[in-house]
Image (cartoon, grey):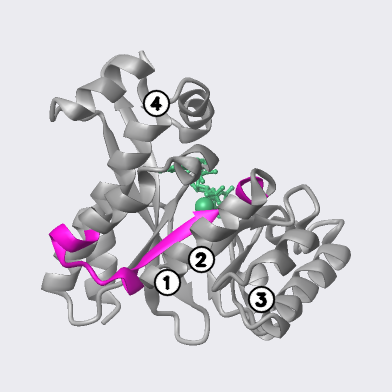
């Protein structure tokens, strides 16, 4: 199924689309950017979660066309926002390890930005620790190349696994994203400890000169706590779900 659907992207008939989840500046409540999240609307299977197909796409190399689709859709959306809004929000695209190692990646990206006239400063890449674990020297040079192009780099799912601290020191990210497992336990039985952990991550990020996004904010209590601890940005169902672009645009217009 997946292969046929991915191949149909090239033929123009895509069953994939991006949804956009607002990222909110916690001080002001304003939407500053969006995380682009792939959705697969399959004719018969219905709406399939990326959790079900990203791993498979990585295994059989469909991630190249699929990731390429996500990236070009996001950049084309940025071009529309840049034309239509005085303050265009940024877009954060999730990039998987294989895309990162693809020697064609940099060139495709450059062509895409040049072709659309999109400011690289509006584009962000979300990278997981797994990217940093593989072929470190090459990865660090790709990261530096992206940084030199003016793209913002976010470390995703921080604290979800592996030896985070080691990777944090290898490269300075613009933004660290606190994994939603910490945020979601604020207010539960293990809440006291995860509060401490979330606060420590916020302090650590700031001491490394990075901004912090807390993901997975689902309650007013979590939001309050994160604001009080000086967290810069937030994302989560309590603020807004991932939305089709027309609904995202409505929020954007209403927020001005
Ligand atoms: O939005 P949702 O919770 O369904 O996403 C599940 C997972 O799929 C998340 O880890 C997210 O990072 C990943 N994902 C969503 N869109 C993309 C994409 O375009 N590329 C890659 N590599 N991963 C994505
Ligand atoms: O791994 P990554 O951070 O890219 O995953 C993003 C995923 O998190 C998306 O699938 C999105 O739907 C999901 N997500 C976003 N906000 C929330 C939230 O408040 N609660 C939960 N459970 N999932 C969320
Ligand atoms: Mn992400
Ligand atoms: Na994440």
Residue under label 4: 62
Q: Is residue 126 above or below residue 60?
A: below
Residue 207 found in image quarter: bottom right
Q: Residues within 10 Å of mark 4 (few under 14, many from 20)?
A: some
Please state the horizontal and vertical placement of residue 53, each as a whole percent of the image: 47, 27
Q: Is residue 247 left or right of residue 226?
A: left
Residue 226: give its label: 3
Residue 139 locus on image (x, y percent)? 57, 52
Q: Are marks 4 and 2 in contact (CB under 8 Å)?
A: no
Mark earlier in primary sequence (4, 1): 4
The disc label shown at residue 202, or none:
none
The residue tagged 1 is 148
Left or right: 60, with 229 as reference point: left
- Nearest the viewer among 15 and 29 is 15
Residue 5, percent from left and from top: 28, 20
- In this rendering, the answer to whether 229 lies above or below 66 is below
**Of circles 2 and 3, which is in front?**
2
What whole-number distance in Å separates the C-alpha atoms at marks 4 and 2?
A: 26 Å
Verify CB contact (< 8 Å) between mark 4 and mark 1: no
């Amino acid at each position: 199924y997946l292969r046929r659907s991915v191949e149909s992207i090239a033929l123009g008939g895509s069953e994939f689309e991006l949804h956009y989840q607002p990222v909110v500046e916690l001080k002001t409540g304003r939407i500053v950017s969006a995380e682009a999240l792939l959705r697969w609307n399959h004719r018969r299977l219905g709406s399939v979660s990326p959790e079900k197909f990203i791993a498979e796409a990585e295994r059989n190399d469909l991630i190249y066309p699929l990731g390429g689709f996500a990236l070009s859709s996001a950049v084309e959306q940025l071009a529309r926002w840049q034309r239509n809004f005085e303050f265009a929000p940024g877009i954060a695209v999730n990039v998987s390890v294989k895309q990162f190692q693809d020697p064609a990646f940099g060139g495709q990206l450059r062509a895409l930005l040049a072709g659309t006239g999109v400011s690289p400063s509006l584009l962000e890449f979300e990278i997981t620790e797994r990217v940093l674990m593989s072929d470190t020297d090459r990865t660090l040079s790709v990261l530096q190349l992206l940084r030199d192009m003016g793209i913002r780099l976010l470390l995703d799912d921080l604290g979800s696994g592996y030896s985070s601290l080691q990777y944090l020191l290898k490269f300075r990210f613009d933004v660290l994203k606190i994994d939603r497992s910490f945020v979601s336990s604020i207010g539960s039985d293990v809440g006291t400890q995860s509060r401490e952990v979330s606060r420590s991550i916020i302090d650590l990020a700031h001491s490394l000169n990075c901004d912090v996004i807390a993901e997975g904010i689902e309650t007013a209590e979590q939001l309050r706590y994160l604001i009080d601890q000086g967290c810069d940005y937030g994302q989560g169902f309590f603020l807004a779900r991932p939305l089709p672009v027309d609904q995202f645009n409505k929020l954007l217009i209403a927020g001005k």
